[in-house]
Amino acid sequence: MLAAITPMITWAVYFVVVYAVQGLGCDQAWNRSLLLGTNALTLTLVVLTVAALALITWQGARAWPRRSGFQGRVAFALAVLAVLATAFTGIPIVMLEPCVA
Amino acid sequence: MTAADVYREQLERTWSNAPGWRGQLTAVNHSTIGLRYIVTSLAFLLAGGMLAMFMRLQLGWSDQSVLDHETYNQFVTMHGTTMMFLFAIPLLEGIALYLLPKMIGARDMPFPRLTAFGYWCYLFGGVFLYTSFAFDAAPASGWFMYTPLSSIEYTPGLGSDFWLLGITLAEVAAVGAAVEIIVAVLKNRAPGMAITQMPLFAWYLLVTAFMIVFGFPPLILGSVLLEIERAFGFAFFDPARGGDPLLWQHLFWLFGHPEVYIIFLPAAGVVSTVLPVFARRPIVAYTWIVLALIGTAFLSFGLWVHHMFTVGIPLLALSFFSAASMGVALPMGVQVFAWIATLWTGKPWLRAPMRFILGFFFIFVLGGLTGVMVALVPFDWQVHDTHFIVAHLHYVLIGGMLFPCFAAVYYWLPLLSGRLPDEGFSKVSFWLLFLGFNATFLPMHLTGLLGLPRRVYTYGEAFGPAMQWLNLVSTAAGFVFALGVVAFIVSVVLGWRHGTRAPANPWGAATLEWAMPTPPPVYNFVSIPTIASRDPLWDEPLLTERLAEGQGFLRGAPRGTREMLGTSMRAGAPELVVEISGSTWLPLGTAIALFAAIVMFMVKWYWVSGGLLLVVLALVLAWLWTTGDRLQRREIDADPLVLPTQAGSIHAPGLWGTAVFVLVSGTLLASLVFAYFYLWLDADAWPPVGQGALPMVLGGAALIALLGAGALLHWLRAAGLAAVALAVYLVCVTIALTGFEASPREHAYASVVSVLVGFHAVHAGIALIMCVFTMLRPLALRIAALFTHYVVGAGVLMLAVIYLFPAVQ
């Protein structure tokens, strides 16, 4: 059963990590150092988002051949949900300033 | 006398509660305790409802003086607290405890003493909270107890203490029930009932129970920290000493938002159970519903900051939570569409339970839509802390929880009593509730948009006549709603006592509980059936007769012990026979001792309180000593199979229960580590200048002792030596703490480090006692080893956080 919920666990870990890194980055003023045309904090968050999306996609792809069974279907559909949730959580990263100042 | 009569007579003798009052106080079986939860929670519903009526009278027109502001604050706090902690959760626990074993083909919950203990904790916690009115010290800081308002400086009396201690005690019940539900669903289903075939209600309860495991510890931790701050002057939430009031909000809402789903999901489980019966077809998209359920459970943990949109967190961080808040509508939508499809393709049949389900749809969907509105940050900034939010949360909670629960009561009334509810009377109560509800809370959307703040005891005429008239409508309709609640209770009591006799399975349901005679016997099933489909009663019409004749596992009770089956997690293959406890004084005694310790703590008789905790420990040891097999493994003829008993088995419910408890404790530890880093983030220096650090040598010694204990247990199975190593560890950390330069009263750093060490020391102490215990009871070694390994892992993490982190930061 644990295998079926792995994509959602990945999302949960991603969610906690981006929230923590955002708080930490603002505290340490990473948003003020420029890197590759943007600031270091935004870049870190984008990298984390892409990594999470890749990981979940891989987890979903592994469940695809088993989609006719109950567990495989749940795992695959949860991976779809997790990709949507991750993308939805991640979009504001490229739209908003990461910190108050 | 037929063979079946003999079985019934044996079972009756073995499973019945003792006669009279003594029997009531010593009962442990799930039907008795489940009903008790339901009745007690309905009593608290009436109490909480009365408070609401007074508040509505006060707000009926501007500048009323029904309640002064202090009393209003008390009522608003107690109303929210009662409805959440003393009504909603316990009612669902009651329904779960009563029904779950019957639906999955078990005779009881796997830990009956824990069931009873949980109930007493809930009852004592709830009554304790209400006694605060008698001392004119009812909590008045809101049901969320925000610091610094609830801190000692601004609430010097006992109000907050009543809340923190009473509610924490009541939460013990929820955590205990969660442990039981998880183990029962995974390990005590009827043979053949694969996890993909179990009733959807069991899926809802399983997911909810896991949410309790991860959702309740943050609040328990927050309450303990706040109580320590209030009682001993530690600093966690006081910014002058390095604390942060927002830490409380984080811990509270880490619990508080999942809590909404913890309340809603079991009620949704009722909908998924009742709806197919009245649509007269199997539920559409079973797999998709399970999927939606798991998705909702996860996403609901990413919503907590949406209660904190206005506290000054950077917009990007808010947007993460805004996204998750809207995202949770996806799986919920899947869920709702599966229900609609079931109705659409079925042949719906309108009876009392179905009417309440339709009411649920109407109200809950509206509450869900305003939920998506307030998930948007800019909109939330406009309506935060106004009556718009009051309207939203009541649409969600009353729609999502109260209506399905009332449907559940009508639906299962024939099972409980053997009699049908009165259709006409139930219709009256439905329309009073439905119209009363909407007329009470719909206007609040408008008063909120007009700017009426929440939790404020009055408003001036300056808001204009529209505000007054809308409020007057709310108040009047509130009384209609209250009348509906009374009508509901009266109709249930009348149906119970004087309703028409119900035929067997009166609604034509598919789930196993309807295969029992009504009212159900204390042992549920004469024999345990083998289940081969998702809708057993529809696919196997003769099942009821076969069970009554005793065709199945464990027929009768030839050994005079309460026996149930343990089955494998996925396929439901029989693995063992679980012998469970009969009536005993231990749960009540333990709960009384724990309650007394808490009362003594509140009146600051700390030594007496400590002594009482020793009594609790002694009673817990007596409790453990009198369960299971002492020395030898046994096998039982469960016909057609011979199966081992639980002692020493890798499938023992005790082992699984311990594993779930480790998850609870691990979440507590994680919350505490979160608090540590949260406070670190705000600090200028860590440890603060002049506060010193813990002595390094002792940390090293503690680490070695701890790892030694784990190794001794793992490789040598030497419980005695492991106990010695744990004792050495405890000595090391005690010396380390007494040699600590800083006082926890001075700065949050010392406070949080002391609590981390203390929290872990308590666990190490428990592991030590468990190791000693297994020297006398070798069969319990696996359980002690599991817990000790957890303690070793937690200790390594704890030492890394307090020693390593300050050095490498």
Image (spheres, rainbow, N blue to C red):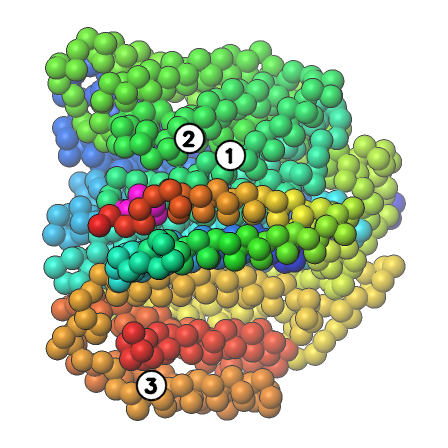
Amino acid type at mark 2 = Gly
Q: Is B323 included in the stretch rendered in magenta?
A: no
Q: Residue B226, image x and y in percent?
A: 25, 56
Label 2 is found on which chain of the structure?
Answer: B
Mark 3 vs mark 1: same chain?
A: yes
Cα distance between the residues tagged 3 and 1: 48 Å
Mark 3 and mark 2: Cα distance apart in space = 49 Å
Whether label 3 touches label 2, CB < 8 Å: no
In the image, taking residue B420 as reference, residue B7 lies left or right, namely right
**Residue bounds of the magenta highlight:** B313-318
* CB contact under 8 Å: marks 1 and 2: yes
On screen, residue B263 above or below B116: above
Q: Position of residue B497 (x, y in %)?
A: 58, 24
Please tell me which residue is depicted at 41% across the width and 18% down the height of the picture: B437
Which residue position is annotated with label 3? B699
Q: The residue marked by circle 1 belongs to what chain?
A: B
Q: Which mark is residue B329?
A: 1
Q: Nearer the viewer, mark 3 or mark 1?
A: 1
Instruction: Please tell me which of labels 3 and 1 falls first in the chain.
Output: 1
